[in-house]
Image (tube, rainbow, N blue to C red):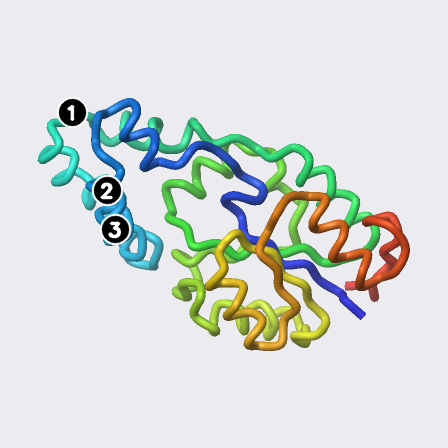
């Protein structure tokens, strides 16, 4: 029986336009120029001990002729992101049914501080949130998934996982965690109903007490 649902964060509970597209549309930086920089910087700033995210970005902003101080840059990045209300409602329902809910996210300290300050759903909805900048494990590293299992006394077959990255889903499946590429709240309900029988999240039986 499934006892826990593990979710990715961005693209699932927090949604917004791609940063590369915003830099192309609003700052005139071509996507093909921006994406390699993004892929270079993200793994560095999403791990423990990273310097400020802005310090990694500033040389590139300067080379692109973009004048933004740290506050302006972080606000530009984060304030375009919004809560995914249908997923929040589903998560509340799952929690009421007794399932444990976890977030596992490759993320940076500045961004998560913004979320904590601006998104109320972070307070009490999830049993625990696992950020790469705190754990030191960057998905699809198998240790990121194993940490959740070990800390919460869970077996792989007791969990179901949703992420918008195919490689992250493949890594979880390889560990025996039933995992799917996220395709919206109806997709989550469908996969959960297949595990618990009946239709949708309302069919989920109460898991063992935590």
How far apart in space, not on screen, are marks 3 and 2 (Cα)? 15 Å
Observer-nearest of 209 and 92:
92
How far apart in space, not on screen, are marks 1 and 2 (Cα)? 21 Å
Residue hosting label 3: 41
**Residue 41 in the figure: left or right of residue 109:** left
User: Quarter of the image containing the N terminus?
Assistant: bottom right
Label 3 crowd bin: few (<14), some (14–19), many (20+), radius 10 Å: some
**Is residue 16 positioned above or below 152 on the image?**
above
Residue at 43% over, 70% down: 141
Residue at 39% over, 64% down: 136
- Are the residues at dot 3 and dot 2 in contact (C-beta closer than 8 Å)? no
Mark 1 vs 2, N-terminal side: 2
Q: Position of residue 137 (x, y in %)?
A: 41, 66
Picture disc at residue 67: 1
- Are the residues at dot 1 and dot 2 in contact (C-beta closer than 8 Å)? no
Label 1 crowd bin: few (<14), some (14–19), many (20+), radius 10 Å: few
Residue hosting label 2: 32
Residue at 69% over, 43% down: 185
Q: Position of residue 26 (x, y in %)?
A: 28, 22
């Amino acid at each position: 029986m499934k006892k826990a649902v593990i979710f990715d964060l961005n693209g699932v509970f927090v949604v917004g336009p791609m940063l590369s597209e915003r830099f192309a549309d609003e700052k005139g930086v071509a996507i093909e120029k921006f994406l390699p920089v993004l892929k270079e910087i993200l793994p560095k700033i999403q791990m423990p001990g990273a310097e400020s995210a802005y310090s990694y970005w500033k040389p590139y902003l300067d080379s692109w002729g973009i004048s933004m101080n740290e506050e302006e840059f972080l606000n530009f990045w984060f304030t375009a992101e919004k809560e995914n209300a249908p997923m929040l409602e589903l998560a509340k329902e799952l929690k009421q049914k007794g399932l444990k809910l976890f977030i596992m996210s490759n993320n940076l300290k500045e961004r998560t501080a913004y979320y904590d300050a601006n998104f109320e759903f972070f307070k009490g909805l999830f049993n625990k949130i696992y950020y790469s900048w705190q754990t030191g494990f960057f998905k699809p590293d198998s240790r990121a998934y194993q940490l959740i299992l070990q800390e919460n006394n869970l077996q792989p077959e007791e969990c179901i996982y949703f992420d918008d990255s195919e490689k992250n889903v493949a890594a979880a499946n390889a560990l025996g965690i039933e995992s799917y590429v996220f395709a919206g709240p109806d997709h989550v309900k469908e996969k959960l109903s297949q595990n618990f029988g009946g239709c949708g999240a309302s069919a989920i039986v109460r898991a063992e007490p935590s």
